[in-house]
Amino acid sequence: MKNNKIYYVASVTAMIFWGASFIATKFAYSVFAPIMVGFIRFLIAAIILGAVNLSKLGWVKPDKKDMKTIALSGLLGITLYFSAENIGVKYTSASNASLIIASYPAITTLFEFIIYRIKPSTKKIFGIALAFSGIAILAFAQNDATNHNVLIGNIILIATGVIWTFYNFTTRSVAKKYSPLTLSFYQMLFGTVFFIPLVFIEQGSVGTITISAVLAILYLACGCSVATFLLYNFGLRKLTAATSISLMNLIPVFGLIFSALILHETISLKQIICGIVVILGVILSTNENKKK
């Protein structure tokens, strides 16, 4: 632990960036529509990541067959995922969003069983059930006047987890062939291109530009899409994948803290309990047997 302290700090810092992303998204909505936020965010991120990639590795072009797979992963993991996430965050609270997104590893484990017939252990099955029970209570047991919109936002975010799952499945086949920098750059590049028609379809005009909205976009692009990627991968140099996945459970914790401190959202006892249930479920559903 002592020798790996800097790697833990890097990984936890990445979780802080991600945890605050929902708050930054809310600020960006004061000026930009949800899909426009995604387009601007990844346009900036692709330019920065392309420059970093070029300076470190030179110009690397994937094989033609792999390029199609990478383009599909960019469509799923960048365009569709963040379009759906941004729309979901618009309708629900930032605290709800951070808790629902915490369940995505459990959703992935479930679909691994459905599609690839990877039979989960009893512990994993219990973990999946636990995570989904927490999300179900959180998503469908709203008691405020904005019940309808919040419910829509929660359902969209749950569906977004399915998109994220298929992004993971698509990316697996090319992940070991190219460096994370190269792969992420092309995914962001394709994702940004696929955003263009959605921006024209999206209804809603750009409002009066404010400093807070611009800073929010820059934070999402430079902080959450570039710096976080570099920090997280730096941590993976010494930390195991299992440790890194466990640290990701800090995202909803930071999300709740920032929602309360910055957006002044009221964190209910139900949210706290559901959050604990979801995190426990994810830990159980993603924990690998040491022998395996």
Image (spheres, rainbow, N blue to C red):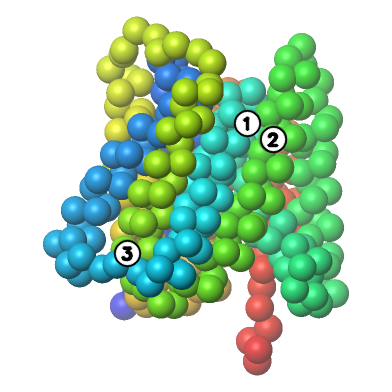
Residue 271 position (above or below residue 62):
above
Q: Name the residue under label 2.
A: 156
Q: What residue type is labelled 1?
A: Gly
Q: What residue type is labelled 2?
A: Ile
Q: Name the residue under label 1.
A: 88
Q: How far apart are marks 1 and 3 (CA)?
A: 29 Å
Compared across the picture, whether 230 is left or right of 200 comes to left
Q: Distance between the residues labelled 1 and 2?
A: 5 Å
Q: What percent of the width, then of the height, locates residue 278?
A: 72, 51
Residue 54 position (above or below residue 161):
below
Q: Name the residue under label 3.
A: 182
Out of 238 and 29, give the one closest to the viewer. 29
**Within-10-Å neighbours for mark 1: few <14, some 14–19, many 20+:** many
Q: What element carries label 1?
A: helix
Residue occupying the far front of the picture: 64
Q: What percent of the width, then of the height, locates residue 123?
A: 80, 72
Residue occupying the far left of the picture: 55
Out of 12 and 230, give the one closest to the viewer. 230
Disc nearest the viewer among 2 and 3: 3
Residue visible at 60% across and 36% down in the picture? 84
Number of labels in the image equals 3
Residue 259 position (above or below residue 173):
above
Q: Quadrant of the C terminus?
A: bottom right
Residue 2 in view, yes or no: no
Compared across the picture, whether 57 is left or right of 220 comes to left
Q: Is mark 2 on a helix, strand or loop?
A: helix
* Residue 112, label in figure: none
**Within-10-Å neighbours for mark 2: few <14, some 14–19, many 20+:** some
Q: What residue type is labelled 3?
A: Thr
Residue 64 occupies which quadrant of the picture? bottom left
| Among the two numbered marks 2 and 3 on one chain, the one whose residue lies closer to the N terminus | 2
Q: In which quarter of the image is the N terminus?
A: bottom left
